[in-house]
Each structure stands twice: as C-alpha cells, then as structure tokens.
Image (cartoon, helix red, strand yellow):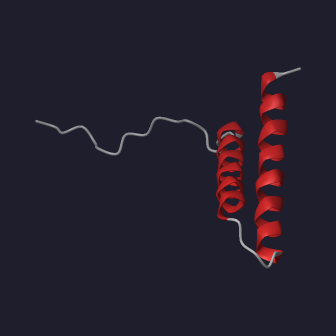
Amino acid sequence: MNGTKLKRIGSTLLIVVGGSALLYELASTTKNYYVQSIGIVCLMGGLFLMNTTLTSRTTDTETNFFEQEEE
C-alpha cells in the first residue's frame, strides 16, 4: 500500500473520529471534558495530516521583484 494513500486514510479516520466525538459531546447532557479534548486533538491532527498531503496549485517560478540597479 502506498504511503500517501495510508496517510490519507489515517487522516480521514482521525477527522471522522474527532468529529463524531465532538458531536456526541455536544448532544449529551453531561459533559466529559476528556472526550472533548480527545475529539479536538483527533480532529486537528487529522486536518493537519490532510493539509500536509495537499499540493500547491501554483507553479514554482522564480520572480525577481527588484530590478538590477544601473551604475
């Protein structure tokens, strides 16, 4: 299995687990702050991993913003 595919599956799984934990805590009457903390950490970790797999759409061209000075 490819490393990027495994990373994408893992990040999606973390996002789903974190989001579902936060939605569960939002709907419950008694609040468990440990589940909320774990949900936030999983959600943000999954979003971070998803962001690292995305590539830039812009091309890497070197532009010179300063013109050479003539003496």
Examine the image and state in which quarter residue 3 appears: top right
Examine the image and state in which quarter residue 65 appears: top left
Query: How many numbered discs?
Result: 0
- Residue most extreme to the top: 1
Can you say whether 38 is above or below 60 in the image?
below
Instruction: Point out residue 43 in the picture as x, y percentages from the top left corner.
Output: 71, 53
Residue at x 72%, y 46% (from the top left corner): 46
Can you say whether 48 is above or below 62 in the image?
below
Instruction: Point out residue 41 in the picture as x, y percentages from the top left corner.
Output: 65, 51
Instruction: Point out residue 50 in the picture as x, y percentages from the top left corner.
Output: 72, 44
Examine the image and state in which quarter residue 57 appears: top right
Residue at x 24%, y 37% (from the top left corner): 68
- Front one among 20 and 61: 20
- Residue most extreme to the front: 30
- Front one among 48 and 58: 48
Residue at x 70%, y 37% (from the top left corner): 53
- Front one among 25 and 17: 25
Left or right, 4 with reference to 49:
right
Quadrant where the C terminus sits is top left
- Residue most extreme to the right: 1
- Residue most extreme to the bottom: 29
Residue at x 18%, y 39% (from the top left corner): 69
Instruction: Point out residue 52 in the picture as x, y percentages from the top left corner.
Output: 65, 39
Quadrant where the N terminus sits is top right
